[in-house]
Amino acid sequence: MRRYGKHTDEDDIRSRPNRKGNRPRTHTRPKHEDAAEGLVLTVDRGRLTCLVDDRIVMAMKARELGRKAAIVGDRVALVGDLSGKKDTLARIVRIAERTSVLRRTADDDDPYERVVVANADQLAVVTALADPEPRPRLIDRCLVAAFDGGLTPLLVMTKSDLASPDELLELYGALDIPYVVTSREELENGAAAGLVREHLDGKITAFVGHSGVGKTTLVNTLVPQDRRRVTGHVNAVTGRGRHTTTSALALPLSSESGGWVVDTPGVRSFGLAHIDPSRVINAFPDLVPGTEGCPRACSHDEPDCALDAWVAEGHADPARLYSLRRLLSTRERKEGD
């Protein structure tokens, strides 16, 4: 074997030829300055349906994005075949910074965070007043996720012909959440869509609710050109409906002022393992000044919390403090409680 000394000549060193004849790999990635902008409408097994201008384009995530995944509502940059023709595929090479994110986990012990929708302006929490019965703890959890993710909540109550909305309105009145009350007849004749649409025009609204509450029926009425299969059965024993929406889907509102509706799968649970309870206070700006005297790392739901004395002095409505603490404690209680 030939051994090289300290003073070898370059001519003495052999270089292994590139048998494939291709260029060596580089860590320099292309900038894709000519990439087109698009909106992710739905995701299905690694294939993303995107709206590029007025065309529907199928795409996949570029390898250079690594583990970063695009979700419904994401603003993305695409290259490749953007014609939208059958059997064509584009590549998503960039994902724009998100203005809001709705997240959930399967339960409070699950460390895996599921991102539901990005860049939504508000979250419409749909609940039936009867058949199935309302689940206030699930509503609380949805509200916490909305406040934490930067979405404005909207409470939509259906089936008012079966039960009165007064109890729920009293429970959430201190939160000043906008709400809409609809009946089954209004859902069927389209009147409910008109009531809800007043809150949707010009915004991206994600709809969430457990099965059987009429969420998908309402979305079908709002976006008739893209009707989704309706839940037609509510189990008489469990009071829960069958899931008819299996993936989140963004649908355009047919109105002059624009707007989008994001229909999400029906949920049976809404875990909050990913949420830091200390951030929930930010959804109560009228209570934030009262936290200045709180001990360090105060949970705002403990005996030494300064909010008790501050509210007792008349600086804020006691109902607001009660609502804050109800939301903070929702992680310790199951949705069905």
Image: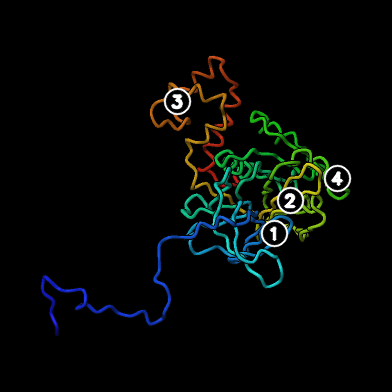
Q: Is residue 239 visible?
A: no
> What secondary structure is found at the residue carrying circle 2?
helix
Camera-side mark, 4 or 3? 4
Residue 121 at what x, y percent from top left? 65, 41
Residue in the picture at 67% in, 47% down = 206
Going by the numbered disc 3, the residue's amino acid type is: Cys
Residue on which disc 3 sits: 305
In this rendered view, identify the residue nearer to me: 166 or 265. Answer: 265
Q: Earlier in the sequence, mark 3 or mark 1?
A: 1
Residue 90 at what x, y percent from top left? 61, 65
Q: CA distance from mark 2 to mark 1?
A: 10 Å
Q: Quadrant of the N terminus?
A: bottom left
Q: Is residue 62 visible?
A: yes
- Dot 4 crowding, Cα within 10 Å, few <14, some 14–19, many 20+: some
Residue on which disc 2 sits: 215
Q: Earlier in the sequence, mark 4 or mark 1?
A: 4
Q: CA distance from mark 4 to mark 1?
A: 22 Å
